[in-house]
Amino acid sequence: MFNGFTDATVDFMWGIRFNNEKTWFEANKETYLTEFYRPMQDLGGELYDFIRDKRPDYNLVCKVSRIYRDARRLHGRGPYKDSLWVSVREPADQWTAKPTFWFELSPDGWVYGLGYYMPKPLTMAKLRSRIDRDPKPMEALMKRLAGQEEFQLETMDYKKPRSAAPNPLVAPWYQAKSFSICHEDKLTEELFSRQIVERLQTGFGFLLPFYDYFVTLDGDRDPREG
């Protein structure tokens, strides 16, 4: 059971940010495991159970990120990340192209939500095509999003819309090449108790209808086929 992160969790994250080298990490590895990695596993397990209970027919897995950076992509940075994140998603070799629930903790704060890390252009084309065929479901989701204050839609956009949107309410999806529906916060007190579990479960419960919509996109026909 997850009982909250600790001051030692925060100290480790700042420590690895400013001492990003193997010697320091190895000397503090037990703190990493007991105060950061294992609590993140516990939190992820509870979030996974919550979503699985709500959607038992979905084939989902829970993953905690590695602290080790990919040696091929260091680009002058140290070998370790100063944050961890947990995800709940479908198993896939290209998981970045799947809709994903996530929570991430860093020295600067925390963020959680739903989105794609790197959706395929075809996936976003299918999304636009689905909205073209029947805009009402997405309109309802956008109204749902507008009626609350926890989450914001964040998109990485093309310079120009891919096609004309049927109405302003759904227009953001016609320029987006990736997106997340997320909440970002500072290191709030709830992180250090079970309150964060309740907060995340409530948030993921709100996002489930969005996941239901996105997760079936791969099964849509290719819009290029006419």
Image: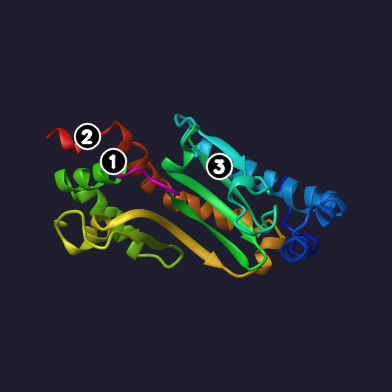
Q: Residue furthest left?
A: 226
Q: Residue at x 22, y 61 (%)?
A: 160
Q: Indicate the secondary structure of the residue bearing disc 3.
A: helix
Q: Amino acid at mark 1?
A: Leu
Quadrant (top left/top right/bottom left/bottom right) for the C terminus: top left
Mark 2–mark 1 Cα distance, whole angstroms, equals 7 Å
**The magenta segment:** 116-122
Task: Using the rendered view, name the quadrant where residue 173 is placed.
Answer: bottom left
Q: Mark 3 belongs to which amino acid? A: Phe
Left or right side of 85 for 39: right
Instruction: Give the residue at mark 2.
Output: 222
- C-beta proximity under 8 Å, tags 2 and 1: yes
Work out whether residue 158 or residue 42 is closer to the camera in this orientation and state it.
158
**Residue depicted at 70% across the width and 52% down the height:** 79
Q: Nearer the viewer, residue 68 or 56?
A: 68
**Residue for badge 3:** 50
Q: Residue 132 colored magenta? A: no
Q: Which residue is mark 1?
A: 122
Which image quarter: residue 147?
bottom left
- Marks 1 and 3 sit apart, C-alpha to C-alpha, by 31 Å
* Amino acid type, residue under disc 2 in the picture: Asp
Q: Residue at 65% across / 57% down in the picture?
A: 83
Q: Is residue 118 magenta?
A: yes
Left or right: where 168 falls relative to 116: left
Secondary element at image label 2: loop
